[in-house]
Amino acid sequence: MPIFSNRSIARMLQTIGPVIGDTKVTDLRGRLEAGAGDAIAAEWEVAIIYCLSLQGRIEAINSCDGVREPDIIYVSSDGARVAVEVTALSDRSFHDKNPMRAFSGELLRITFKNGINGFGAIQYEIGSTDSPNGPVLGVPSRRDMAGFFASDAFRTFVAKIKSAPASPGEMAFQINGVRSRLKFVPGTRFGGGTHATFNLPVDVRSNPISSRLKAKDSQIAGSGLELPSVVFLCDADCYVLEREKISGNAASAAEIIELFLNGRHSGPFQRARSRSRRINGVVACRVKEEGSWFRPDFRRRHVVSEVVRNRSETCHALRDDCLAEIAACVHHLPPIARMPVNALTAPRWPTHYGGYRMPGGGPNSMKIEMSLTTLQRLLAGTLPTDQFARDHGKLVEQFKRATDAGKLISALKIKECPDDDDDWVEIELNAVAPTHLFKEGKDEAKGEQSPPSAANVAPD
């Protein structure tokens, strides 16, 4: 699933389609359909080109066989033409080397499969050893992952937990020359554990950011375009790009970009030499999330951009105000639906699943809003009723109160959410159930009223 909603991406792609052409649209649709990292890169490309089309004017680049052109030409407010390339950056190389995410994910899957989560949680302490290219964790490689979890030692560890769920358990193991261990902690809900940070660049000249910029520099040079150029470096789950500051001796994203463009920076690697004459500026875009983890409706995600200008002599000059104008296009981005790390996997539930809202009604009426996609899944039989009731306790309680009071559904209204991949359905309960037709007068005589309605009830 994407960082932006599918609806937002489709709307943006439809807007820029007439400019970029059918061939480019077909390519982008195919990458979006493929999912995972390729889809994230494609949606960033769609989003930035769309924002540039709102900021100024865009022109397609005529493609040539065997030549990889930049994504688009931007025409500024004063007529300056600039080649723009959009690229997404992830920590895939770090995770290939240390597949900690795959290890913890499989551990969690096995925990739920065996019902261990009903008794406690499995936690881990992963050792590591240093290497010239950064820490090497004591976890199995992707190739050896299945064998580790199918081993006699791990199976015995799980069996002991299931046979004595009130007792702590431990499994020690050694991989890559370092010792690690798994611990079963009864009575806790939280798994997870500790390990060394492995996705920070240890070499300012050789890392995912500098490697990507070097490739883009060569691409722009090989395109034959005699124009200044700007590269958008977008967050596709990149640890160093996501952080404003980096502690220790590791270089930050801004320092790496500064070194690549200008051949110097003020960090610990100031003696290193590199520089680009083709890229006039880099706009680094990271996705930031703020708010409460316990109140999803109060979480806010937005894009923070940082501009690093090439202050050295370049092949083609670009004024500061033009670079600022191009960078400002990110203000046109649609709402962020999910963080990049979550966009790598398909969500199990609809966007509004588990939540409900009560916008209020009259003294004798009641309105309840719930996820439209959830309702459709429930009616289609793909969502079991017991699962729905378990995950929507407060919503079910409101419907039960209305039913007990003799209220019947009188109207349905769809409330569309154009930037989400789910809508709200407003259910009005304003009719009298046949079973209560002769109780209405009696209840009014006793002074009984309909259940009170609440406003803006938080999701369950």
Image (cartoon, rainbow, N blue to C red):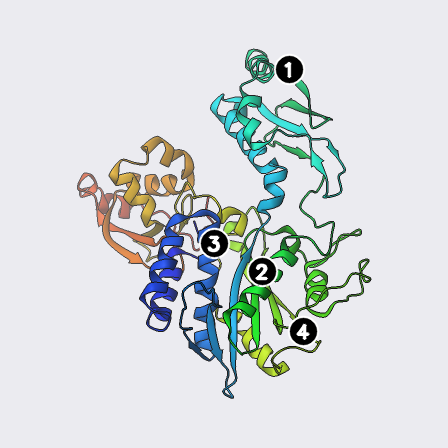
Extreme front residue here? 66
Pointer 1 or 4: first along the chain: 1
From the viewer's side, name the closer residue of 418 and 32.
32
Task: Answer few, some or many: residues within 10 Å of disc 1's Cα (few below 14, many 20 plus, some between 14 and 19).
Answer: some
Which residue is disc 2 drawn over? 215
Element under disc 1: loop
Disc sitting over residue 310 in the figure = 4
Q: Do the residues labelled 3 and 1 touch (CB within 8 Å)?
A: no
- Rounded to the nearest angstrom, the CA distance separating label 2 from label 3 is 19 Å
- Rounded to the nearest angstrom, the CA distance separating label 2 from label 4 is 17 Å
- Rounded to the nearest angstrom, the CA distance separating label 1 from label 2 is 54 Å
- Rounded to the nearest angstrom, the CA distance separating label 3 from label 4 is 27 Å
Where in the figure is residue 277, as x and y percent of width and height?
Answer: 65, 73
Disc sitting over residue 40 in the figure = 3
Which of label 3 and label 1 is nearer to you? 3
Pointer 1 or 2: first along the chain: 1
Disc sitting over residue 167 in the figure = 1
Asked if one can make out residue 447 in the rendered structure from this viewpoint, the answer is no
